Image (cartoon, helix red, strand yellow):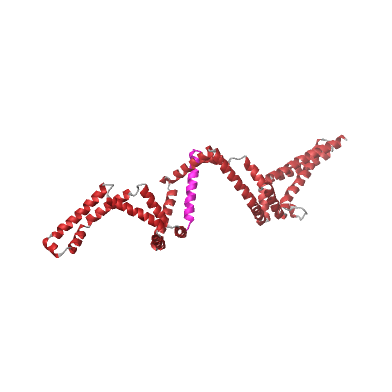
Amino acid sequence: MRVFATAMLGAMAATFLVARHFGAQGGAHGAWGYVLAFAEAAMVGGLADWFAVTALFRRPLGLPIPHTAIIPENKDRIADTMAAFLRENFLTPQVVARRLAGMNLAAAAGAWLSDPRDDNGGRVRAGAAELFAQVLESLDPERLGNQVRAGLVKQLGKLEVAPLLGQLVSAAIADKRHLPVIDSLVRWTGLTLEDNEDIVRDMINRRAGAVLRWTGLDERLANSVIDGLYKMLAEVMVDPEHPLRAKIEEGLAKLADDLGTDSDLRGKVEAMKADLLANPAVSNWWQGVWERLRTGLIERARKPGSGFGGQLTEALGELGATLRDDPALQDQINRYARRSLVGIATRYGDHIVRLVSETVKRWDARTVTDRIEGAVGRDLQFIRINGTLVGGLVGVAIHTFDTLL
């Protein structure tokens, strides 16, 4: 556009020379007189607008003419003016609140998230999964693992475990959830006895008298004891009302009560908890668990067929549908968004405009000139073109008026 405007000015200069040459032969009031007036006034208008446009960004012909190179010479003031304009017209709480009053941000977000189109869902899925993986990769695994462990240790240290365990046992007994535990305990006892029959027999033989061993009654006694134990365990297993079961339940109930009321038992449980938390093996175990969890999540997030992206997309779609169809939820979220954005404008508006001002001030004069000229330069060249044409038309009008007089 600059070349075109300059070429038009050159064309007017050539027209002026041609019209002046032929106008001198045919007289000033002939057709050539109008052409000459048009070209002469067009050159004046084009040169004037060229000077005006150029003076905004640089010194015309490099001459130190006052009030030229306006933008480079006043870039700091322009930066402050831009910042003040932005602050007063866009980042005031009143303007932000008024602009957001008619916007349903929650419904718009819900409609977008619930859009079933594959391309939309694919972008959301891929972007969210990759962001999740990058966040996990950027974290120092050892440092984060230690921080999480320290946080868990601190919270568990504040928590008194004994009363909580007592409540859990009481609740399990009340809901009959302890019965499978008793069955498993009886079954485990029977299997343990079966695997260690030789040890039991040896214990009975060693404690039997010499007469019993001499008569062989020790072996019969051992068989009787073992058979009796098997019979008792079988009865406990099949009889829900067996006295031994009642004893076990009574012991569990007493344990639950003691965990909540017995200070000595509570102290022992707390000491065991402290020893367990301070054990380095627990720390190493947690570090391994965290690293496997982190690595697995990263791999799953980036693996196309893992289903992670699909689950994420499904969850986002359900969230979007809820936002889209629930006016009460929309109203709550929109109110929260308005309050948040108005609060941001109130608290950080000055920081935002200061960022704009300081950024422009840090630019050198050439950068400021190039960026502003690149943004509006095309329209400024139209000013030169229009100035050339309008100047020519004004010249013709003046020449016509002079001829008529």
Q: Nearer the viewer, residue 108 or 224?
A: 224
Task: Answer whether residue 134 is magenta in the image.
Answer: yes
Residue 116 in the image: x percent, y percent? 49, 38
Give the quarter of the image for residue 200.
bottom left
- 11 relative position to 404: left or right: left
Q: Residue at x 44, y 44 (%)?
A: 311
The correct choice, above or below, for 398 with respect to 227 in the image is: above
Q: Residue at x 17, y 55 (%)?
A: 224
Per the rendered image, the range of residues in magenta is 114-141
- Quadrant occupied by the N terminus: top right
Query: Total marks drawn?
Result: 0
Residue 348 in the image: x percent, y percent? 63, 52
Residue 247 in the image: x percent, y percent? 30, 53
Residue 281 in the image: x percent, y percent? 38, 62
Task: Answer whether residue 235 is magenta in the image.
Answer: no
SS assignment for the magenta stretch, majority: helix
Q: Nearer the viewer, residue 383 or 189?
A: 189
- Quadrant occupied by the C terminus: top right
- 16 relative position to 331: left or right: right
Q: Nearer the viewer, residue 389 or 380?
A: 380
